[in-house]
Structures are given as structure tokens and as C-alpha cells.
Image: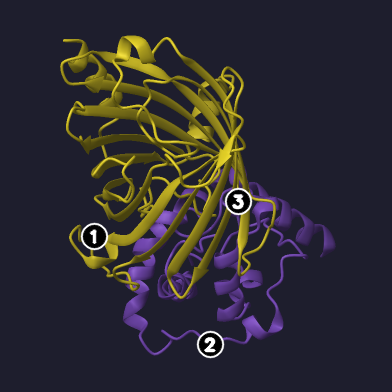
Chain colours: A purple, B yellow
Amino acid sequence: MRARLLTMSCLLALLAVSLGQNMLYWPDPTWRAPEAVSAKPNPLAHKPWAAAGGKKLFLRSCAECHDKDGNGLVKKHSADLQLPVVQQQSDGALFWKITNGNTGRGMPSFSKLPELERWQLVLFIRTLKPAS
Amino acid sequence: MRTAILVVALLAPLSGLAQESPYFVTYDHHMEEPGNLEIETQSTTDVPRAGQKYYFAPWTEFEYGVTANWTTEFYLDGQTTANDSTIFTGWRLENRYRPLKREHWVNPVLYLEYENINEADRIQKELEGGAPDVSSPNAVLRREIDRELETKLILSSDYHDWNLAGNFIAAKNFTQHEGIEFGYSLGFSRPLATLASATNCRFCRENFSAGMELYGGFGSTLGFGFHDTAHYAAPVIAWAVSDNATLRFSAGAGLTHESSPVLFRFGYSYEIQGFGSKLSQLFRGKQ
């Protein structure tokens, strides 16, 4: 049973690497949004149509490192945004991470985008689902 | 003929960025994204005072994001003066480093630049010390070489979609006894819309940002103050014409007698995303 699990994990890892996806992404444990910010709700949560604008922004500003489908790129060491470790974070935490970046790990700050556009990015990230 | 060659050479990168800051002189705390190369061609021209000649001073700038908190830039400057000549006026190498990892109310950036230019340089990318000499002929001015080390403290803040930035300049010219020269620039700007539409519209308000700059010199350690210094108040506007390209325009009003009455600036920038990785692929061994 254990050997099968190990084999499956290795195959999955190989597949991920061969596809260029970064399913092996492991988050920086020191990169955490303050609790007060994490609890912030998305002001666009009741405007799901705004996610389309978020997609446009994502393709323009994020896809270079996170790929068009948000699944990350191994060579860029970028996060696979479809992974539960990302999707389980609150809207406020994702907003904080887009705003501040993590310069030590190569993620730039996107505070130059207006606040609502950053919330649009969060809306779009919520739509990213792993391919079945 | 020489004018045409210079203009073509400096405008060569014309072809196609994400929304950039509208400032020409003021720096904010937003750095170039790591691995991206931005090629910019900008120019300064003015309405001359009586007895002065028209000039056009273009420059080309290569801005590269080395890391998420370190940006380096290289400039090539030129200048052409009506009924005088067209000349290359020198080069500059600058580095900006953002020491703090997170966004703060005030975000400092440290700036260091080395300039190897001559006195005919009129791009006025920043103003420090006294006003530039726009009356003497190029043949005289180009013989005076300036090798200068320039430092800036950039303080910038984003507040509810507004950017507020202040730059404080100190520059030392190693080839002339001018003491340490000082200057400043202040700016604020805001995008015209804060919600992105779903379509790739080019004339939507979200693609425009506007603001204002105020800049000038403070004299030097040999004579600190506003005497014989130039100062401008300049509205600025930027238009993201495509995902990679931005056009900018500014019309600055001279505030002192040493300033030109009006200083016009035009800029076009094109960003190549992932330039660093594309370049490294070229030098990688074949698989």
C-alpha cells in the first residue's frame, strides 16, 4: 500500500514537472497576512461578473509567472494557485499577498494596481480549478 | 541628416506594458517586475525665452528588474538645437533598491546613479543645483564633461488608489567645483478608473492615469536656496495603449525666471515580460 502511494506520488511529481506545473509548490511559512487583514471580506463578492476583469488583469500581470491557468511554473518557483494550500486562504489573505508581494521569493508587490483591481484578481483566483 | 539619425536611433524601440506611473521626473516605490525589461524613449522640449533657441532632447532608457526589490537602468541621452547641432550628450547608469519587504504607509527606496554627460545635456530628467544653460552653443557646452554621482531618497505612499511620492536629491560632480547640489521632486497621481472591465478596450478610463509633478533645484553647498534655480509644476498623464505599451505626456509650467516658460515631455515605453529568462534560454545548452 505504502509502496503504491510512493509510486503514485513520484509519478504525479514527474507529470507535474514534465507539464511545467508547480504542483510541488510549498508556501513560505513566514509569508502570512496579519489576522485583521485576513478577515477582510472581498467588497466585490456580490459582483461575480467582476471576475472577468480580474482574468484580464491576471493574464496581463500574473500569467508570466503563474501561467495562464494559475498552475504555477516550476522554473519560476511560482505558486500553483489551484492548490488547496492557496484556495483555502481567505480573500483578505490573498489580497494582502498580492498587495505586499514576497520579494525574498521573487513575488513582486502589486500595490500599483488600484485596490478594486486587486480584489478583482482575488475573485478570479477563486475561479481557478484543477483540470479534471 | 544627423538629426534624423539621432531621432531614429532613439525612437527605435517603438513597437508596442502594463499601466505605468505617469511621472517623468518623480520616482515612486514601484519597482520593475523581476526579469522584465522596459525600453523607454522620452524627450524634453521647451518654449524658449527671447534670445534662446528651440531644442529637442530625447533619451532612451533600458530598465530591468534584477530582483523584486532591485531595479537597474541605463540611459543614452541626445540633444538637437535649432540652427546649431545634434549631439550625443552622454550616458547614465542608475540603481534603485527597496529595503523594506512589505508595503508601509511610507515606502523608502534608495537610489544611486552615475552620470557621464556633458553640459549640453538638456533632458532634465531631474533638476538639481542651478538652472541648466540653454543659451550657449553646443560646441562650447559639449566640451564640459560632467562625471556625477547622484543619490536620491525616494519616499512614496499609496493611499486609496492615490500615489504620493517625494524625491530628495543630492549630487556631486567630480569634474567641476560645484559643491554638492540639491534638488527635489514631488508628485501625486491616480488612475482614472479603479475597476477593470472585462474587455480589452483601449480608450477606457482604466487605461489612463493622471497627476501632477513639482520639481526643481535647491542650489548647492556653495549657495543653498532658490536663487538661480529652475522649478516646474507639471500636470502628467499616462495612457496604456496596449498590455505592454504606455504613452505619457507632461506640460510643465516654469515657476521662476530661470525656468523655461513651458517644458513639454513625451514618453513611450514598451515592456518585454520575462526578458531575463528568454535571454538565459539563448545561452543554455541544447537538450
Q: Quadrant of the C terminus of chain B?
A: top right
Mark 1 vs mark 3, CA separation in Å = 32 Å
Q: Amino acid at mark 1?
A: Asn
Label disc, if present, on residue B200 of the rendered structure: 1
Q: Give the residue at x 43% y 58%.
A: B187
Q: Amino acid at mark 2?
A: Pro
Q: Nearer the viewer, mark 3 or mark 2?
A: 2
Secondary structure under the numbered disc 2 in the rendered image: loop
Count neighbours of disc 3 (C-alpha within 10 A) and say few if under 14, some if 14 to 19, many if 20 or more.
some
Residues marked 2 and 1 touching at CB (< 8 Å): no
Task: Give the x, y percent position of residue B236.
Answer: 30, 54
Q: Is residue B208 left or right of residue A12?
A: left
Residue position marked by numbered label 3 in the rendering = A16
Count neighbours of disc 1 (C-alpha within 10 A) and say few if under 14, some if 14 to 19, many if 20 or more.
few
Establish whether labels 3 and 2 are both on one chain: yes
Q: Quadrant of the N terminus of chain B?
A: top left
Q: Is residue A70 left or right of residue B234?
A: right
**Chain containing mark 3:** A
**Chain containing mark 2:** A
Q: Give the residue at x 21% y 28%.
A: B52
Task: Give the x, y percent position of residue B21.
Answer: 39, 54
Mark 3 vs mark 2, CA separation in Å = 33 Å
Task: Give the x, y percent position of residue B121.
Answer: 38, 24
Secondary structure under the numbered disc 1 in the rendered image: loop
Q: Quadrant of residue A51?
A: bottom left
Residue position marked by numbered label 2 in the rendering = A41
